[in-house]
Amino acid sequence: MRLLILSLVLLLAPSGAQSQQLKAMPMPASVKTEQGELAITQSFSVAVSGFRDSRLERGVQRFVKQLSQQTGMLLSSSLAPNTRPTLSVRAEHGSEEIQKLGEDESY
């Protein structure tokens, strides 16, 4: 889930984000920003690889629903089965069912 949040912050940040402070918590140890854009069209899709559970899937669905509301486009909230999604999310592992002290929150 944290990987999704960081990916979205980096991909959807306004241009000139290099000079702005990243609004992420916990703050990543390092961030690399690059030039580019993420086109949001009717064919926008999200694919999840690596670790996958219902919590991550619900997070992706909430993100797509919010993006749909913000853009005014009806976007499909189902995860992309194709090999060329617009946005790819890779999770290494899940988090504890109930967060606990000392839990690894790294991106």
Image (cartoon, rainbow, N blue to C red):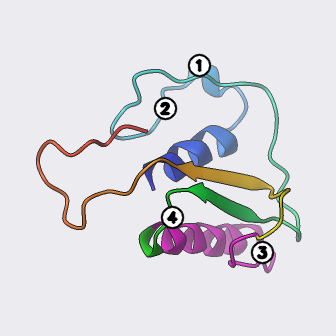
Which mark lies nearer to you, 2 or 3?
A: 2
Q: Secondary structure at mark 4?
A: loop
Nearer the N terminus, badge 4 or badge 2?
2
* Distance from the alpha carbon under mark 4 to that under mark 3: 28 Å
Disc ID at residue 22: 2
On the picture, is 95 further left or further right than 75?
Answer: left
> Looking at this rendering, what residue extends furthest in the front direction?
50
The quarter of the displayed image where residue 75 is located: bottom right
At x 49% / y 57%, what residue is drawn?
Answer: 51
Is residue 78 part of the magenta span, yes or no?
yes
Query: Which label's residue is closer to the chain start, 3 or 1?
Result: 1
Indicate whether residue 71 is drawn in magenta: yes
Q: Label 1: which residue?
A: 19
| Earlier-in-chain disc, 2 versus 3 | 2
Q: Say left or right for 74 vs 4.
A: right
Which amino acid type is shown beneath numbered disc 2? Leu
- Residue denoted by label 4: 52
* SS assignment at label 2: loop
Q: Is residue 77 above or below residue 7?
A: below
Q: CA distance from mark 1 to mark 2?
A: 9 Å
Neighbor class of circle 3 (other Cα within 10 Å; few <14, some 14-19, many 20+) is few
* Label 3 sits on residue: 72
Question: Residue 63 location, x and y as percent?
Answer: 58, 66
What's the residue at 58%, 49% (across, down)? Answer: 90
Tell me residue 73's x, y (percent): 81, 75
Which range of residues does the magenta coloring cover? 56-80
Q: Residues within 10 Å of mark 1 (few under 14, many from 20)?
A: few
Image location of residue 47, percent across then percent down: 70, 62
Whether the residues at callouts 1 and 2 have beta carbons within 8 Å, the answer is no
* Res 71 quadrant in image: bottom right
